[in-house]
Image (tube, helix red, strand yellow):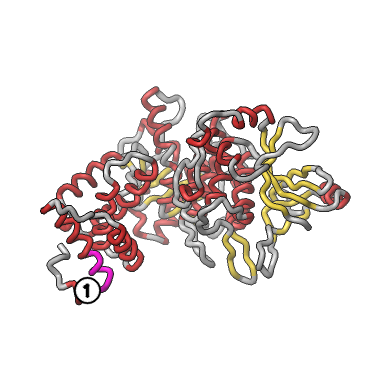
Amino acid sequence: MLVSVRTRKLPRALWLAARLWARIKRAERTQDSTPLFDQQAVDHAAELWRLHPDQSEVQFVVGWFHYLRLGDGDDEETEQDRRVLTDAFRALHRRMPGQVPADVREFLEAEHAAKRTAIRLLSPRALLACAEFPAYRDLTDFTEWHPDDDRRVVFVSHRWTTATHPDPDGRQFLELLQRLRELVREHPSLADCGVFYDYWSMPQHPRSEAEDEVFRRELGRLSELVAAADHVIILSEGYRDYRDRAWCVFEAFVAATSTLDWSEGSPTSVHYFPDQDHIEQDLAFLRTTMFQTVAGKQVKFLTSWHHSYRPDMKEAEAICAIFQHLGTCRTTEPGDHPLVKLQLAQAMNRLPNLTPYGRLLLGIHRYFDATCCVLTDDGIPLPLTLHFKQPDWARIPAYHQIGERERYPGPFCLSPEQVEVLQAGGGSRLSMLRFAFTAADLDRFHQAKGWEEYYVPAPMLIHPTENPFPTLDHLVHTILELGPAPLFFLPGDDEHAYFPLADQRG
C-alpha cells in the first residue's frame, strides 16, 4: 500500500507508517526471525500516532500494527485496546473501504453485527403521522440505532408522570412535536434523523421475558446513545420536577459532558429552545459542578491523568457532588436507583481525563451511598449540602491547590447552624466521605487471604474503563493499600466508616 512510495519525500508520519507496514508484510511473507514488535517499532507507532492521529492511512497502519501485537489476549486491558483500535479501523473503512484488506474487512463486518441494538428510533415524519406516543411493540415504521451508523440522532430527555405511562394526558407529545418542528427548521439536515424517546425506543412494562432481556441489555447502552446524540432535547413539561429525577439527572449529566473539550465556552449537545432559559438555569448545577468561572475563564474540575492515587480535591468535589445529589433523586420504578447509579459510574469512568483517584471515588459511590462531610477540630462531622439546593446558605470555597492565586466557590454549603458549630469547634480540619461500613466489616478484609489479587494499581486506571473495581473486594483492598489509616471510625458512631479526602483548614 504505502511501501511502494518514495518514503524520503513523505512527511515523517507517513514515512513511519510505511516502515511499520513494511515490517508487518515482511514478517508475514518470510517469517523473519527479527522481532516484529520490538521497542523501536512500538516507539515508531507511538510517534506516528502523535504526529498524525486523524489521517486514515495512519489510523490503519498503526491500528493494524497494534492489533497484531495484542495477539490473543483476553484480559480487560487488551479488550479495551482492541475497542480503541477498532475505532481506527472503522474510520478508515468508512472513508477508504478499498484499502482495507479482506481479513480486516471481515473482522469489521463481524464487529458491526455484534454491536447491533434493538433500540428503536422514529423519524420526525413518522412521529408527525401519529396521534399519540406509540408503544415499543406497536411500531412498524422505525429503524434500529447502531453506534457506527452515520444517521443523526435526537435524544429526548423527560420525566415519567406515572409509573405506567410517561405522558397520559398528551402534553409531552404536543410539546415534542413543536420542538421537532423548530429543530428541523433550524437544522434542515435533521429531517431524516432518528428520534429516541424511551417509551417507544425500549420495551416497557409489562414486558415479556424476552423483552425484559432486551431492555436490560439496551439499558447498558443508554449513556453511549446519549453521548452519541447530535442533539438532546429536554422537555419543559414538569421541568421543576426534572432535576430531582434520577434518570433525568443521569441523562443530563452525560449530555452535558459528552461533547466537552475542556476549554472555555465548549458547547454541549443539549439544545435549549428560546423559551427554556429557566431550564438552562435550573440545570446549570451540572455544568458548574464540572466547571467554575474564574476571571472570565472556565476552570475544569475533572483533571488530567496521574499515574498514582494522588488526591485531586477539585475532582473529588465534582464527583461527590454529582453522586450525593443523585442519592436524593427519585425514580419511577422503586428498584431503579442502584441501576442509575451504576450507569452513572460507568459513564463517568469513560471520561478520558479522570485520575485514578477519581475512579477510586467512583468505586466508593458505586458500592455505597456516601455523604460528603467536614470534620471540626473537636471531632464533630458536619454533612454538606449541595449549594444549588440551598443557595442562601454559606457556600464553601473549592479546595485550594498549592500555587493557585484565587479561591472560587465549591459545590457544597453549610447551614447557619452548622456554621456556628464549625466556628465553635475550632474550624474545619478534614473533608471526608461517610458511608455505612462497620469495623467488623473492615476486619473481614484485614484477615482475608490472597488479597493481593484484588489490589488495583493506579497505572491500570489511567485509561477509560467501565468498571475498574468489579467487586467490593477490589475496592476495599485497594483502599487499604493507600496508607496507614485509609478508613477510620469516629467515637460513638459504629455504623459508618470515614474516608479522608483532604486536610483543609479555614
Task: Indicate left or right for 285 with 230 as reference.
Answer: right
Q: Quadrant of residue 482?
A: top right
Which residue occupies the foreground of this view, 217 or 421? 421
Residue 498 in the image: state x and y as whole percent. Answer: 69, 40
Q: Vertical placement of 236 versus 267: above or below?
A: above
Where does label 1 land, which residue?
10
Task: Indicate left or right for 431 with 113 as reference.
Answer: right
Task: Indicate left or right for 275 with 219 as reference.
Answer: right
Residue 191 in the image: state x and y as whole percent. Answer: 35, 54
Q: Vertical placement of 492 versus 112: above or below?
A: above
Residue at (46%, 27%) from the top-left corner? 205
Magenta region: which residues? Answer: 11-17
> In this view of the protein, can residue 246 be seen by the observer?
no
Q: Residue furthest bottom?
A: 9
Residue at (45%, 57%) from the top-left corner? 182
Residue 345 in the image: state x and y as whole percent. Answer: 52, 43
Residue 19 in the image: state x and y as whole percent. Answer: 21, 64
Quadrant in the picture for the C terminus: bottom right
Q: Residue furthest top?
A: 209
Q: Vertical placement of 72 versus 272: above or below?
A: above
Quadrant in the picture for the N terminus: bottom left
Which residue type does callout 1 highlight?
A: Leu
Task: Indicate left or right for 82 with 132 as reference.
Answer: left
Which residue occupies the foreground of this view, 108 or 120? 108
Q: Residue furthest right?
A: 424
Which residue occupies the foreground of this view, 22 or 325? 22
Chief secondary structure of the magenta portion: helix
Q: Residue furthest front?
A: 33
Q: Secondary structure at mark 1?
A: loop
The reply to whether the magenta stretch includes residue 198 is no
Residue at (77%, 54%) from the top-left corner? 392
